[in-house]
Amino acid sequence: MKKFLVVLVILAVVVTGVFADPVPPAPQSKDLKIFGVIEVGDVNLKVVKTPAEDMLVINLIEDDDVQPSGDGVRVGAWVFTGVIQAENTEFEISYEKTPLTSGNGDSYAFDIIELPEDEQDGYDKYPGEGGLISFGEEGGDLTVTQGLAVKLVSAIPSGAAPGVFEGTITITLTAK
């Protein structure tokens, strides 16, 4: 009888174990990675001639503003646009020029004048040489417009040969 009771108890334990509620699995977790980006925005340098619709021809003898003592003749402007830039991002503007030269070989040097009426936050000038564009502590967006004028380094000598003169200002934008 004892054997019978032992078998009955074992059978009861096995049967209840089979029909008992299953043990829930341990909690599981998986990661879903989400990626985002804030891209550095565009930077653009545009150069505009003055007047935009006509070819500007400066009379090198009669125009008082182009003379060494003059205020300069406005010849154009550059426009820098930077969007979504990181804090303390800097760009340098620099100028290279070729003298006013005619077909007969005569040439005359000129100075570049950054017009003072175009002074703006974010642009520190190196007079006649360009300057530094800075986005500062907060970064973000910035537009700087700088007008340019030219004047002769020295007066045209009397008796100079007539001709059509052409010079160039190359404006370069460089990331610092």
Image (tube, rainbow, N blue to C red):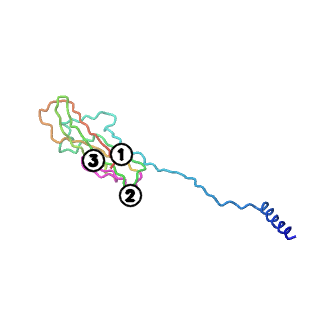
User: Along the horizontal axis of the image, is 4 left or right of 82?
Assistant: right
User: Could you say which is closer to the camera, residue 61 or residue 14?
Assistant: 14
Residue receiving disc 2: 137
Q: Residue at x 15, y 40 (%)?
A: 155
Circle 2 or circle 1, nearest the eye = 2
129 within the magenta span = yes
Residue tagged 1 = 80
Identified at 66% across, 61% down, the residue is 26
Q: Is residue 112 left or right of residue 48?
A: left
Against 121, residue 162 (above or below) is above
Q: Which of 41 and 54 is in front in this view?
A: 41
Task: Give the mark nearer the N terminus: 3 vs 2.
Answer: 3
Quick check: marks 3 and 2 in contact, CB under 8 Å?
A: no
Q: Helix, strand or loop at disc 2?
A: loop
Residue plotted at (68% across, 59% down): 25
Q: On the image, numbered disc 3 is attached to which residue?
A: 130
Disc 2 to disc 1: CB gap under 8 Å: no
Marking on residue 92: none
Q: What residue type is labelled 1?
A: Phe
Element type at mark 3: strand
Identify the residue at the far bottom of this view.
2
- Report the amino acid beneath label 3: Gly
Q: Give the range drawn in magenta.
A: 121-140
In this rendering, the answer to whether 24 lies above or below 173 is below
Residue sitting at the far top: 104
Q: In which quarter of the image is residue 170?
A: top left
**Residue 6 position within the rendered picture, expressed as x and y whole percent measured from the top left:** 82, 68
Q: In the rendered structure, which disc, 2 or 1, sits on the residue that comes first in sequence?
A: 1
Q: Residue 110: x percent and y percent?
A: 20, 41
Q: Kindly report the distance in space between the C-alpha atoms of the residues bearing marks 2 and 1.
A: 19 Å
Q: Which amino acid does label 2 sit on?
A: Glu
